[in-house]
Structure formats: C-alpha cells, structure tokens
C-alpha cells in the first residue's frame, strides 16, 4: 500500500501503539526531543538565499565601479602607483561598506520571517501547549480549530463538524468534510483521505484532534515542495520609486560628468586626468548606497516595532502605517482585557449577583439579600450545567512560589476562549465542574461557535441513554430559537411579553457594559442531527449571564494620541450595541459627534447610503465579519487609509482589503495572520498606535537621509561642474572625491536612519499616501543646500587659489575639507523638517559619533604625513581653517535662517 494511504484503515489503538503515544497524555517532552533529533525539524526546506561571498562580489558589479577600476588599472600601468592603489583601496572599502549594509539588511529580513513562523497546539506530558510548528514530531497529538493551518500530516482521531480546504494540495477549493473513522479500501487518492489532515491546508470550520504521522519533507506538501513558489516580493513602494529614481540619477550624473570632462578638456586639462576625475565623480554622485540604507532603516525600524510588540509581516506596510487615517478595531481583547468574569445572571424572573474576581473559582450567588445554593435551585443548576458542558475551555490550577519567602501560591488560569473560561469559573463557584457533570453526561457532538452565527451547541448523553441539546450564544440570536422558558423548574411556553422582558433585562445588563450570553437546552431523542439547524430549535430558555470585560488601561491614552495625530478610531464588535456603546464611551471612542449602528441596519442599507453614514459612525455593533469588508470599502471610498484588525477565519477578506491588515498574535487564527501585514503580539490596541508612531518615524528618517545623500551629491557635482565651466583648475582630485563619497554614504547616513522620532511625530495629520518623497521641503532642502554647499566650497577654493595660484594642492585641500565639513554640518540640518535650529544636535548619539569619527578621519588624511601625498593634502594653518569652517557652515546656517523667516509651515507627518 502506498505510504500515504497507510494509516487510513487503522483504529485509534493501533495508531497510538504504532507511534508509541498515550492518547490521554500525548508524548513526553523527552520522547519528543529524541524523535526531533531523529527526524529533524518539521519544516519544508527552502532555496538558500544569497551567500555572503556572492553578496560581496555583487558590490563590484556596478558598471561605473568597473569603469573606475579599469581606469585605475590603466593609471597604474602608466606609473601612477600611489593613486592607483589608493583608489582601489577606497573602492574596496566602499564595497565592504555596501556589503555590510546589505548583509545586515538581509539578516534582519530573515529574522523577521522567522518571527512569523507558525505555532501549533500540542498535547505533551498531559498538558496542552503552544509550540512552534517546527518542533512537532510523529506521534504528537495536535488540537485543531477553525482558522488554523494544519501544521503537519495528521490522522484525525477526533473530528467535530470539521471542514478542511485542501486546494493548496489538491486544487479543489470546496472544503472537504472530515471524519475520525477508519476508511477501508486500499489506495485512496489524496482528496478522498477524509480521515487525514495535510500540512499547509486550512481548517474552515469545526474542531478536532489529529495524530502527527509525517513531518517536514516527509509530508504530502513536502513531496511537492519544489513546485511551490516561496519567494515573496518584499520591496516597498518607496523602494521601488527610489529604484526608478536611482536610474534617472545615474543618467543625470553621467551626463553632468560627461559635461565636466568635456569642458575640462576644452579648457586645456589633461584628457586622461579629466577622465579619471570624471569617472570618480560619477561613482561618487550615483547614490548606490541609497537602497541598502533604506532597507536598513526599514529593518531597524521594524525591530524597534517588535520591541513594542508589533510584528511586521509585509514590509510595504511600514510605509502605509504613516498614512493611516482610521483604525477599525475589534473590541474584545484588543480594546478590552479579555479577562472576563460573570458578575450578573438573570433567570427565573430575577437578577442574581455573582461575587468574586478573576479566574479564582470562589464566589457567592445572591438574589436581593438571599444567598442561593445552586444545587437547591433547579434553574440555576441547569444554567451552570449548560455553562460547563457547552464549553471547550479549561480552568487550570497552578501552583507558583512567590514573594521573598517563596510561599506556595495557588493561581488559576484559563486555557481556551476567555468567554468560556468565565463560564467555567461561574460553574466552579456553584460547585459544578467538568468532572462533576461528566459523571452524569458525556458529549456526543458539537456544533462549534463561530462569529457569524454567534452561538454554539452540544449534544450530550447520560448513562440511561437520554440525550439533551445544550446551547449558548448571543441573547438576541438564541432567543429566536427558543419556544419555552424554564420557570420554577418547569418549561413554560415563551409568550411575547416574556420575550420582551428577557430582552429588556438583557439591555439593562448591557448598559452596565456587560457582555451577555443566553443559555438554553432541550431534550433530544432519535437520530443524530447532521446540521446545526436541526438541533438548535425549539429550545428552552434558561437564563442570561453577563460578564465584565474591563477596558485595557493604556487604550484611553492611545485613543487620545490618535485624535491628536488626526487618526480616527472606530470600534467594530460582534457584541451587543448597548454593551459596545457603554465601553466606547468609557474609552473616549464615542463622543457627542459620533454615531453608532448595528449589523442589521447595515444589511438593510444600500452601499451609497452606508458610505454617507460611515463618515460619522464610531461604533459598529453586532456585526458579522462580512460587514467588515463593507466598512473597509466605504471608508476607503472616502479617501481614508484604513487599518483593520481581525482574528477569525472570516475576517481575512476585510484584513486583506484594508490598507493595513492587523491580526492578533495570541487569539488570532493562522488564516487571519497570513492575510495580515501586521501582527500584534499582545493583541493590544495601544500597540497599533505605537506601530503607527514607528511607521511615521521610519518614513521621516528615510526622508532625512535622502535629503542628506542627494544634497551632498548635488554639492559634489556642482563644485566640479562650475569649476570646469569657469575654466578653473580641478578643485578636487579623484581620490578626494571618492573619499568624500565614502564618508557621506557611510556612517552619518546610517546614523540618520536610526534618528529618534521628532517630538511632534504624533501631533501631525497623517501623510497623504500619494505624496512624493520630495514633498514638504525635502526637494527644496536638497536643491538649496546642495547649491550652497557647491558654491561655498568653490568659493573657498577660489579664494585660496587666487592667493597662491602656484599652490594648487593647498587650494584643493581647502576645497576638500570644506566639502567634507559642510556635509558633516549639514547632516544635523537633515534631522528636522523645519531647520537645524529646531533640534538638539546631541540627541542622536550615534550621529554625533559618526560625525566625530568622520571629522577625525579628515584630520588624519590631512595631517598624517605618509597619507598626505596619497590624498594630495597639506597641513592647513589657523587662517585657512577659519576660511574652511566659515565656508562649510554657511550653507546650513544661511538656509536655516531663510527657512526660519519663511511663513511657518505645520507639516503633515513625513
Ligand atoms: P469583537 O468582534 O470585538 O472581538 P466579540 O468577541 O464580542 O467582539 P464575537 O466573538 O463575534 O464578538 O461574539 C459575538 C457574540 O457571540 C457575543 O456578544 C456573545 O454573545 C456570543 N459569544 C461569544 N463567544 C461565544 C461562545 N464561545 N459561545 C457562544 N456564544 C458566544
């Protein structure tokens, strides 16, 4: 029998025996470790990325660098050894710099990829644990939930309403219904192996458990791994635009260089020397370092985001973050803490208060002044039974040692959905636990919760074979499926007035910001239902459970920050409108000018009507995931750049359609994460705002070093260009030009890439996404500063040359040091959108160090005698230094003053 069909007809015991696993306990950690060493990680091997050697060699592939090397070789052959060796040394240094930049960029990108590696929920040593999917081994028991990607090849040993979409493997996009029963019949094609789950396929509905039978390259997906394209384009729009710009700049630089060379020759300069100077100028003027520095700025920014708990999955979103003008956020868990506690019940015609806090299962039930004992109250007892049986969460007791004396402390934790956890705690407070109810009832079937239908149900059976349906869900939904109500222990028909009474009590609880669930049941006999609709009808309403879910502390501030930054916050929730409004008001999302709406109203509206309303709506309640897509589109139509959060399978389309799709790291499904561009590792709204702040500052920094690099290049070309036009001697020799380039493309530019954010980063409106990178002052800065740097350098050269026309080396040293110094001063000017006077120059220490070391290097090549002939420099005196310093600081000072006098601009972020 083919290997893949091998386990199809095996029973559960045979499987467990074969894989040496106890189905109740799972593998032990030691056994798992041993197997992992034998079979290797559960990972598909990918094509390797560029090796460091190739990356280094690539640095010499640039056409102009090759021309320069060839020209240098010729000059070496002609006897100019020192020049030739020095130039080659600088070219090599430049290549090493480029290599280091690109290597770092590549490494950070790989690190990012590893961060978003998939996880799996596995049974090990008797406990459910979340581990990286790469650590799974054959024999592991894995729990499966809708929205997960299957983490390895599995034989299903339990499947509840489980549907898996296997198109990645079979091409069939209709989800396949799965079973846990053995399948007979020998060789079965992939698409018909209904008791198997395959690595990489997606669970669209239901729950289950699977036993890992193959991992990594042994899986069905592994067998076709070479067919799957894994490369993803990681270029951001800005990187693409800069690449285009780079091409234009190459042409401009080459053209200007050609003009410089020709005018030089016309004015009687030596043709060969002019050629070498021209090629050096071209190498210097082409900003070949730009793409690598952009990547580094992005990658380092992304690492800062990780420290603030936002994981970027798609690099382009870093840029889009700065443009976000509205954040649509889920309520539960993102704006609130998702630490639910049931505080109120409504049953049998009266309200019951439940004391206690957190997950600690101690508390009392009181109605008015009367203390209730659940065992003696049939309605309350039934409610607690449903709460515990129609539930997949686990309440776990943990012993920890705390404090100085390391005293033993008992703490409680919930594994699973916090809403269900709160119900387990509720049950335990009334002494109804899973162990106690399981003595009487066992679960036969489950129709799981999903946020579309907003309810779930289970079929349970007792020893006598008596069956019962137990259901819980959103009160308004569940009530529609009820025909009776449990009163005084007996089901009575549900009258319209009683229905009204339940809804109004539901409303009262919701107005207290409580999240409500209704619980119901019915007796069942006969055949097992195939569809949920068969079972979830004719129910007997038992009661309501209202739970608090406190807002996250830090969210209020984050929302205030958004308001200042011109970003709107919108709450989207599956919860009841009244609950949503109460919390939105507490958080400051809903103020007087805001509007609210619920899913039913949205469904009734035309697209045009809805788009108009969407302008003012701040709270969307009782929405289904499908509404989210409508909301994204309406907001985008109004010109908004939309950030949208989501966690479920059905949220994926809206996440994908939004400009910044955000998934939850803790509670999010694999599918939502894959659709997203940003994952919040703490599920927290405040993290989105932190990421936007970082996004804005990263983009700012990119604009800063673009201003720096390009203005410096303009200055360099201009000095040479104007000198040749005016018939002057060469103001800079090739080695000097190359050295200037090394200094400018090097440390100071990189230090600008990590410049701390300006104080007003979150006080400006969002950037327009269509805006050019040169907008709002950058273009002006490049031209004005570039022009001034060129002019003043030339002026300094001219003054010195006029004084001593036969000491050209001195004049060249002055031009060289003025140019370097002017750029080192100008770099501080680039840190602010306004002018150099707006920021403390010492607040970026790496930049200060970069500038100081560059200045030191300048002094070394000027004053260290062995280097003087190589760099064509001489030592300068005080008077000459005064000239250099004055000429070097003028461009920045002069332009700064002019900018100060211009009418105040309040720039958008950028
Ligand atoms: P958000 O979209 O902000 O995360 P939410 O978590 O309240 O909001 P859903 O999870 O879609 O949204 O829940 C919608 C409603 O379904 C809830 O108000 C609740 O009444 C009900 N509900 C939530 N969880 C369960 C569950 N596990 N079983 C049954 N009903 C549930």
Image: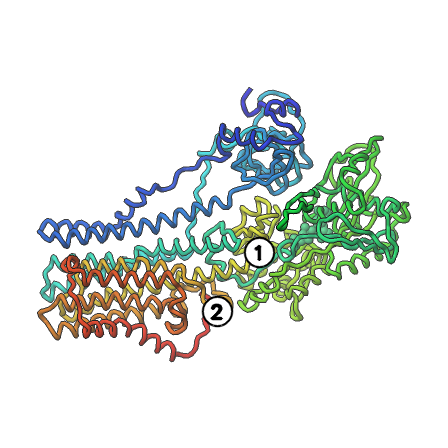
Q: Quadrant of the C terminus?
A: bottom left
Left or right: 324 as drawn, with respect to 194: left
Tell me what residue is drawn at x 25 percent, y 58 percent: 284
Dot 1 beta carbon under 8 Å from ligand 1: no
Residue 712 position within the rendered picture, expressed as x and y whole percent measured from the top left: 29, 64
Which disc, if any, is residue 760?
A: 2
> Which element type, helix, strand or loop, lies under badge 2?
loop
> Which element type, helix, strand or loop, lies under badge 1?
strand
Check disc 1 and report the residue beneath it.
644
Q: Nearer the viewer, mark 2 or mark 1?
A: 2
The image quarter containing residue 638 is bottom right
Left or right: 775 as drawn, with respect to 279: right
**What is the spatial separation of the Cα atoms under label 2 and label 1, in whole angstroms?**
25 Å
The correct choice, above or below, for 493 with respect to 322 in the image is above
**Number of numbered discs on residues:** 2
The image quarter containing residue 199 is top right
Residue 617 visible in the picture: no
**How dense is the environment of label 2, judged by Cα within 10 Å: few (below 14), some, or many (20 and up)?**
few
Left or right: 251 as drawn, with respect to 379: left
Mark closest to the chain's N terminus, 2 or 1: 1
């Amino acid at each position: 029998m083919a290997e893949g069909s091998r386990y199809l007809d095996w029973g559960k015991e045979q499987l467990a025996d074969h894989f040496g696993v106890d189905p109740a306990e799972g593998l032990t950690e030691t056994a798992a470790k041993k197997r992992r060493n034998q079979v290797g990680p559960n990972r598909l091997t990918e094509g390797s990325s560029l090796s460091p050697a190739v990356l280094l060699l690539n640095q010499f592939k640039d056409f102009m660098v090759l021309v320069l090397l060839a020209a240098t070789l010729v000059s070496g052959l002609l006897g100019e050894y020192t020049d030739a060796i020095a130039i080659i040394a600088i070219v090599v240094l430049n290549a090493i710099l480029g290599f280091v930049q690109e290597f770092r960029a590549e490494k950070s990108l790989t690190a990012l990829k590893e961060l978003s590696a998939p996880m799996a929920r596995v049974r090990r040593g008797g406990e459910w644990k979340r581990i990286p999917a790469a650590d799974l081994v054959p024999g592991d028991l894995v729990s499966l939930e809708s929205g997960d990607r299957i983490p390895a090849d599995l034989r299903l040993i339990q499947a509840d309403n489980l549907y898996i979409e296997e198109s990645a493997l079979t091409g069939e996009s209709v989800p396949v219904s799965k079973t846990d029963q053995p399948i007979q019949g020998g060789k079965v094609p992939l698409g018909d192996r209904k008791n198997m789950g395959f690595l990489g396929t997606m669970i669209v509905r239901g729950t289950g458990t699977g036993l890992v039978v193959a991992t990594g390259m042994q899986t069905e997906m592994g067998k076709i791994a070479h067919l799957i394209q894994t490369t993803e384009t990681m270029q951001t729009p800005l990187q693409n635009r800069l690449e285009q710009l780079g091409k234009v700049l190459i042409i401009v630089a080459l053209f200007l260089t050609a003009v410089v060379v020709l005018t030089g020759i016309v004015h009687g300069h030596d043709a060969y020397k002019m050629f070498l100077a021209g090629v050096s100028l071209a190498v210097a003027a082409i900003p070949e370092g730009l793409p690598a520095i952009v990547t580094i700025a992005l990658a380092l920014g992304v690492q800062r985001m990780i420290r603030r708990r936002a994981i970027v999955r798609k690099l382009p979103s870093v840029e889009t973050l700065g443009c976000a003008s509205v954040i649509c956020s889920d309520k539960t868990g993102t704006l609130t803490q998702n630490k639910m506690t049931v505080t109120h019940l409504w049953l049998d015609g009266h309200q019951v208060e439940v004391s206690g806090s957190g997950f600690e299962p101690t508390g009392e039930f009181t109605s008015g002044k009367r203390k209730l004992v659940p065992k003696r109250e049939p309605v309350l007892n039934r409610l607690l039974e449903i709460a515990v049986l129609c539930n997949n969460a686990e309440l776990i007791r943990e012993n920890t040692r705390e404090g100085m004396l390391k005293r033993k402390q008992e703490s409680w934790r919930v594994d699973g959905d916090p809403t269900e956890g709160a119900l387990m705690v509720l049950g335990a407070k009334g002494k109804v636990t899973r162990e106690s109810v399981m003595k009487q009832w066992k679960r036969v079937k489950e129709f799981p919760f999903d946020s579309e239908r907003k309810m779930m149900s289970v079929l349970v059976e007792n020893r006598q074979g008596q069956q019962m349906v137990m259901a819980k869900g959103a009160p308004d939904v569940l009530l529609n499926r009820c025909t009776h109500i449990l009163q005084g222990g007996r089901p009575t028909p549900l009258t319209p007035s009683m229905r009204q009474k339940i809804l109004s009590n539901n409303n009262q609880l919701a107005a207290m910001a409580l999240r409500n669930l209704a619980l119901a049941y019915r007796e069942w006999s006969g055949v097992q239902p195939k569809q949920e609709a068969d079972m979830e009808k004719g129910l007997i309403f038992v009661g309501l459970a209202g739970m608090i879910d406190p807002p996250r502390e830090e969210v209020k501030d984050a929302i205030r920050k958004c308001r200042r930054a011109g970003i709107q916050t919108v709450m989207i929730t599956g919860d009841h409108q009244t609950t949503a409004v109460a919390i939105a008001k507490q958080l400051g999302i809903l103020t007087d000018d805001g509007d609210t709406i619920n899913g039913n109203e949205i469904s009734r509206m035309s697209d045009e009507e809805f788009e108009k309303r969407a302008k003012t709506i701040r709270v969307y309640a009782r929405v289904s995931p499908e509404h989210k897509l409508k909301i994204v589109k309406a907001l985008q139509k109004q010109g908004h750049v939309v950030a949208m959060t989501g966690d479920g399978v059905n949220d994926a389309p809206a996440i994908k359609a939004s400009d910044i799709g955000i998934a939850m790291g803790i509670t999010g499904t694999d599918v939502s994460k894959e659709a997203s561009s940003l994952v919040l590792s703490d599920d927290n709204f405040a993290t989105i705002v932190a990421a936007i702040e970082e996004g804005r500052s990263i983009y700012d920094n990119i604009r800063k070093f673009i201003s720096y690099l390009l203005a410096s290049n303009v200055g360099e070309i201009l000095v040479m260009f104007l000198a040749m036009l005016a018939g002057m001697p060469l103001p800079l020799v090739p080695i000097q030009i190359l050295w200037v380039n090394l200094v400018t493309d090097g440390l100071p530019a990189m230090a600008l890439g990590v410049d701390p954010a300006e104080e007003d980063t979150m006080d400006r409106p969002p950037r327009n996404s269509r805006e050019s990178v040169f907008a709002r002052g950058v273009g002006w800065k490049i031209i004005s500063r570039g022009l001034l740097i060129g002019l003043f350098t030339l002026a300094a050269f001219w003054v010195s040359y006029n004084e001593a026309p036969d000491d050209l080396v001195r004049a060249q040293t002055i031009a060289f040091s003025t140019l370097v110094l002017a750029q080192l001063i100008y770099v501080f000017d680039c840190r602010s959108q306004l002018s150099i006077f707006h920021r403390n120059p010492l607040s970026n220490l790496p930049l200060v160090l970069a500038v100081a070391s560059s200045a030191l290097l300048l002094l070394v090549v000027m004053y260290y005698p062995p280097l003087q002939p190589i760099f064509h420099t001489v030592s300068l005196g005080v008077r000459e230094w005064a000239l250099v310093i004055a000429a070097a600081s003028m461009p920045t000072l002069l332009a700064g003053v002019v900018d100060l006098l211009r009418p105040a601009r309040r720039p958008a972020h950028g």
